[in-house]
Structure formats: structure tokens, C-alpha cells
């Protein structure tokens, strides 16, 4: 009984930069996840879906989010949700527990418009180089072990979220002398 208490995550629940929880390495989550942890992840995914629904986003003043890590809602837990479309317009949803990059490409990519963050209320100009391809090991909501290969935009989003779980912000990767300078000796291409 009493599964899924009706809570809705909104922007007021999102921890902003300066809060030390965003700089901590998060703790592993028990596998299989507790009912509570499963519900938290589902609520995080629902926030992303709501935030991408123009009517709900307007009503609740949500920024259209593609990824959200648990420490961004103040929970020291190694898990995140993502909800994004691929280049064919198909939606992909992820609710991943204890995710880890187990291998990655040498080649890198970046979003030409730079990155932002739900926890950062300002524009930070500059390129954020990310691996073009990653292989991630994680557990799903049932506690089943997964290995997922990602490329392109999905790879960028998942690296952004795994960074959060390790206390890293997107701007940590921006070149300090010239924010639009890319690493040398490594092939780095714009995503578009
Ligand atoms: C975001 N959203 O959610 F192409 F429907 C960003 C914000 C910071 C601008 C809200 C985003 O990129 N939305 C988006 C993009 C599309 C189509 C669409 C919605 N994040 C997630 C975040 O902060 N997670 O911690 C920032 C992204 C920058 C690169 C990857 C994640
Ligand atoms: Zn972020």
C-alpha cells in the first residue's frame, strides 16, 4: 500500500551553486534500490517530463530540463534521471543507479552553444569538451545491471550528470585562459 506519495519536484527543490552538496562525491545507493529511492528517481524523471511540457513548464516556471542528479535536489545519492530526444526525435529516458563510465572514446565533442545547468542561474560562456562516446555501467530501478553505450548528445548529458555525482560542475572543464579554447592534441568536434 501507500506507494508513490504525490510529490512534485519544482525549481524551489533544486539546489543552486554555492551549496556544498554539489561539491561532494555522492554515496552509492543500495542495490536493488529501496521503494523510496525508486520513487525519488521516478519523481526526478517526472520533473524532467513536466519541465519539457510547455503548459506545465509555464504554469510552474520550470526550466526545460534534460537531466537531473539526486544531489541537485539535496540528496547525497549516486543516481540520476535523464529525458532526451535523439537525432531522430525519439525520446529516451534513463533512471540510473551507481552509474560509472567504464570506457570512452579518445575523440571529444562539445555543444557549440556551451552548457548550462539547472543549478546555475547565470550564463557561463565557453566550450565544455566531452567524450564523444562512452560506455556506462549502472543499475536500473529493478536493480538489474546494465551496460549502455551512448554517443553524441546523450553522451554529453550523461557525462554532465555523472560529473554532478562526482562533485564536478560543467564550468570546471572550460579553459580558464580562453573559454573557447579546446584541448590540443585531441580531436574535438562541435556536435552540430
Ligand atoms: C539542462 N536544459 O536541463 F536541446 F527540450 C538544460 C538547462 C540547464 C538549460 C535547463 C537543456 O539543455 N534543455 C533542453 C535542450 C534541448 C531540448 C530540450 C531541452 N541541463 C541539465 C542539468 O543541469 N543537469 O544537471 C544542462 C544540460 C547541458 C548539457 C547537458 C545537460
Ligand atoms: Zn547540471
Image: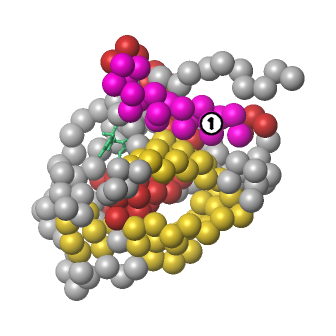
* Closer-to-camera residue (85/30): 85
Q: Position of residue 81 (x, y in %)?
A: 54, 45
Residue under label 1: 42
* Residue 26 x %, y %: 60, 51
Q: Residue at x 60, y 31 (%)?
A: 43
- Image quarter of residue 73: top right
> In the rendered structure, does residue 35 fall within the stretch colored magenta?
no
Q: Residue placed at 20% from the left, 80% from the top?
A: 184
Q: Is residue 164 visible?
A: no
Which residue occupies 31% across, 79% down?
Answer: 107
User: In the rendered image, is residue 189 in sight?
Assistant: yes
Quarter of the view holding residue 124 = top left
Name the residue furthest right: 1
Quarter of the picture holding the N terminus: top right
Where residue 21 sits: x, y (%)?
53, 41
Q: Position of residue 99 (x, y in %)?
A: 60, 60
Provide the residue span drawn in magenta: 38-57
Q: Is residue 8 left or right of residue 39?
A: left
For this rendering, which residue is in front, 166 or 7? 7
Q: Quadrant of residue 37?
A: top right
Residue occupying image coordinates x 61% and y 53%: 96
Q: Magenta region's main secondary structure? A: helix
- Is residue 43 highlighted in magenta? yes
Amino acid at each position: 500500500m501507500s506507494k508513490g506519495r504525490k510529490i512534485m519536484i519544482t525549481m524551489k527543490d533544486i539546489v543552486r551553486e554555492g551549496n556544498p552538496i554539489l561539491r561532494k562525491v555522492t554515496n552509492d545507493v543500495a542495490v536493488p534500490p529501496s521503494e523510496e529511492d525508486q520513487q525519488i528517481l521516478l519523481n526526478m524523471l517526472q520533473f524532467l517530463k513536466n519541465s519539457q511540457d510547455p503548459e506545465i513548464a509555464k504554469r510552474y516556471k520550470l526550466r526545460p530540463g534534460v537531466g537531473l542528479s539526486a544531489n541537485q535536489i539535496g540528496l547525497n545519492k549516486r543516481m540520476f534521471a535523464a529525458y532526451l530526444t535523439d537525432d531522430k526525435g525519439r525520446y529516451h529516458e534513463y533512471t540510473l543507479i551507481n552509474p560509472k563510465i567504464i570506457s570512452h572514446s579518445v575523440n571529444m565533442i562539445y555543444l557549440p552553444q556551451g552548457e548550462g545547468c539547472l543549478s546555475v542561474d547565470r550564463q557561463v560562456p565557453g566550450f565544455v569538451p566531452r567524450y564523444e562516446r562512452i560506455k556506462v555501467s549502472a543499475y536500473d530501478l529493478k536493480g538489474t545491471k546494465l551496460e549502455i553505450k551512448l554517443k553524441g548528445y546523450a553522451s554529453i548529458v550523461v557525462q554532465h550528470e555523472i560529473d554532478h555525482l562526482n562533485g564536478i560542475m560543467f564550468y570546471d572543464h572550460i579553459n580558464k585562459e580562453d573559454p573557447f579554447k579546446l584541448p590540443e592534441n585531441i580531436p574535438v568536434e562541435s556536435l552540430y
